[in-house]
Image (spheres, grey):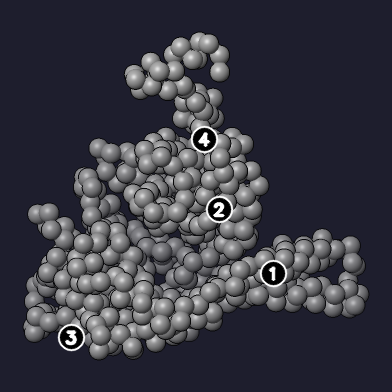
Amino acid sequence: MSSDQTEWAVLDDLLGLEKATTFDTSREDLAFYGRCSTEDNQDPETSYQWQLGNAEKFVDGTIVTSYFDVGQSRSVPWHRRTHANRLLEELRNPDRGWTGVVVGESTRCWIGNQFSLVAPRIHAYGVSIWVPELGGRFDPNNVTHSTMMNMLGGLSKSERQHIQLRTRASMDAQVLNEGRHEGGRPPYGYLVVDGPPHPNPNRAADNLKLRILSIDAAAAPVVQRIFRAYLDGRGDKSIANELNRDAIPCPSAHRPEQNRHRSGDGWRASTVAAILQNPRYTGYAVFGRWTKTKQLRDPDDAAAGRIVKFKRSPPQRIIRSRRPAHPAIISVETFTRATLQRQERGGRSTAAHPTPARIRSTPNAQPRLFRGRIRCALCNRKMQAETIRGSVYYRCRASTLPPGSPHREQHPATVNLREDHLTKPVDDWIATMFDPQQLDATVATLLEASSDENTDTRRSALRRRIHQSQTKVDRYLAAVEAGVDPQVIGAALDAAQAEKAAAQTEITVLPEIEQLTATELRELIESLGNLRFVLANQTPETKLELYEALTLQVRYSHVERRIVLAQHSSR
């Protein structure tokens, strides 16, 4: 030690002064975060593996846990993503087991100014952030690092916008020049069937075909009947009442597998209006009638993120094919007459042209714990969540029942159920599953649910990829034997073999899942103590995650003022 250091050593100690140091460079235990959006059309397992591999290449530490969001856009703020929010919540836990967060690619995790909003929160708990584009740990005191992350956020936003524009331009061209069906549920009166071979050579080699619209023999006459009745002077509601009286299934009842989000309990005026204003019944492909827009969730808090709304597109954004694309149900002349008559009757129907819902400013709004989980026992429809004077209610209104519905006579104007009156009975019911007299059955159920067959989804997905890749390889080899030029399908064959090899490599390095025994699981449950007390003190976000994991379903009888709880099973 030098003489200067010796002279100042005692005084520095008395004053509490420390020599300025850089970040601790010792090895860390890290948490990995990644994201895969459905817009990528990418296998989530493949995306997870390459992002994790990219993160492991440059970190000076060990990745001990992972948080990976699937199907959520990068534009969604972290606290509204399922696993990103779990990571943020885990920061408060001093026994979390990791001291740093690493990502596989920053542009997949942050967009715009999201990093500048999330990073201070992570650093506040003494947790470091590792970013591949920086080549290591992010230093909040390094101006270059901050500038780089701001630039990456802007590039991520620009990349997303360019992808959206290119995709939309491509779809517009396909509809305009080819009349191609761009996916989605077909209009009532049509079916989606296989058409000619796919124009993309690689997809055609996989025996994929274009999907085209075909006439639904049972529903098309109903569409024609609706247009005839309207041109005869009948209104939307009158037509809906007549169809209900004649017991004609409404669109969601006619094809319930395509309308799981609908009740299927009868025709409505809005349904009739939507059919009367759909130009695709003329046999021409029409695309872009509705535009997806994003609005601030809270106008006073831009960091709260945005919500998606659909609104009518301006005329210049709507694309129509140059020639007929599918069989016509009505003529262009009939549709034109119906449209002109609608304008003469008073302009656009508010039922067919809903105004965007007003966005309430609800800072720190709590999640609605039972959204989509409560059904009215009178009409079997899902009750809608609303916030009234600061409390969440689930409501079922008789006014939204279709004309002629048999439930109208016995249904009160509004059925109300307050959320905070429901939470305690639900938590008590969950706790009873772990009571001593029920514990054996609960442990057996949990062991069955945690078996390899049900929980090892990654290994199962890799096995499916291997099988699918082998099927492609066999198909390509059969094509060569049948006389197809090997150079034509050579690239596709190489890609299929490479995909199979990658999946086989991944499955060999996957760790075996260590199953808990019945005794270990029982001890774990008993270690939680009083489960009613534990549930009563959980955050709403944790309870929401629990209810989702249990696939909880609630049926509310207004007459008996009674709720029936159950777990929905898809097996």
Looking at the picture, which amino acid does disc 2 mark? Ile
Q: Which residue is the site of mark 1?
A: 508
**First of labels 3, 1 by sequence position:** 3
Query: Which of these two is toward me, 263 or 351?
Result: 263
CA distance for labels 2 and 3:
59 Å
Residue at image point 18% right, 85% down? 406
Which mark lies nearer to you, 3 or 1? 1
How far across and down, in percent of the image, does residue 110 sit? 48, 43
State the residue position of label 4.
24
Tag 1 near tag 4, CB within 8 Å: no
Could you tell me how far apart the alpha carbons at marks 1 and 4 are, in whole angstroms? 35 Å
Q: Earlier in the sequence, mark 2 or mark 1?
A: 2
- From where the camera sits, is residue 569 visible? no
Percent of width and height locating residue 134: 59, 35
The spot of residue 477 in percent (x, y) is: 85, 75
Mark before the other along the chain sequence, 4 or 2: 4
Q: Callout 4 environment at 10 Å: few (<14), some (14 to 19), or many (20+)?
A: few
Tag nearer the camera, 3 or 4: 4
Are discs 2 and 1 less than 8 Å apart at CB? no
